[in-house]
Every structure is written in C-alpha cells, then in structure tokens.
Image: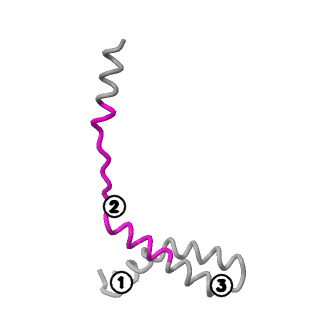
Amino acid sequence: MSDENETSEKRHHNKKSVNTCGASGGVYGMAFIGAAVYFIQHAATFWMGVLGILKAIIWPAILVYKLLEYFKL
C-alpha cells in the first residue's frame, strides 16, 4: 500500500501547469474593463448598465463581424 501512495505522490509532483492565454488574455481583460466602464457611464438606468456589461462581454465579436462585413470576406 505504501508503494501505491509513493507512486501517486510522484505523479502529483511531476505535473506542470501550462498557461496558454499569454498576453491576449490580459489585453482582452483590459478591453473588457474599459468597455464596461464606458457603457456603465453612459447608462441612464440600472438595466441599461446591466446591458452595458453584456455589451462589454461581446463587443469583440461584433467588431470582428463588422470588419469582415466591411471587407466583404
């Protein structure tokens, strides 16, 4: 039984964590915060502020869609 615990411990210590987000995750995070602040500042009501947060989440997708539409791709 002790051999099984030792093997399990060795496997646990040999695992490495790999972060694949890199700088793009930070850029998206900063863009999200900036967009959320912008949309919330321009909101007249609470629900418009909630809608602004939702817009802050999806604005990159809308931007890419509009760019592809503009370039007719």
- Magenta run includes residue 32: yes
Residue 21 is marked as 2
Residue 43 is marked as 3
Residue at image coords 65%, 84%: 43
SS state under label 1:
helix
In this rendering, would 71 be left or right of 52? left
Cα–Cα span, label 3 and label 2:
32 Å
Frontmost of labels 1 and 3 is 3
Which residues are drawn in magenta?
A: 11-33
In this rendering, would 8 be left or right of 50? left
Q: Which residue is mark 1?
A: 67
Q: Earlier in the sequence, mark 3 or mark 2?
A: 2
Residue 13 lies, in percent from the top left, at 31, 35
Residue 64 lies, in percent from the top left, at 38, 78
Q: Residues within 10 Å of mark 2 (few under 14, many from 20)?
A: few
Q: Residue furthest top?
A: 1
Q: Viewer-proximal residue, 27 or 3?
A: 3
Task: Tell me which secondary structure the magenta stretch mostly adopts.
Answer: helix
Residue 35 lies, in percent from the top left, at 51, 80
Q: Quadrant of residue 10?
A: top left
Residue at image coords 62%, 85%: 41
Q: Earlier in the sequence, mark 1 or mark 3?
A: 3
Residue at image coords 52%, 75%: 56
SS state under label 3:
loop
Looking at the rendered structure, the kind of residue marked 3 is: Ala
Q: Viewer-proximal residue, 37 or 43?
A: 37
Q: Quadrant of residue 37?
A: bottom right
Cα–Cα span, label 1 and label 3:
26 Å
15 to 44, vertically: above or below: above
Q: Mark 2 and mark 1 in contact? Answer it, CB < 8 Å.
A: no
9 to 47, vertically: above or below: above
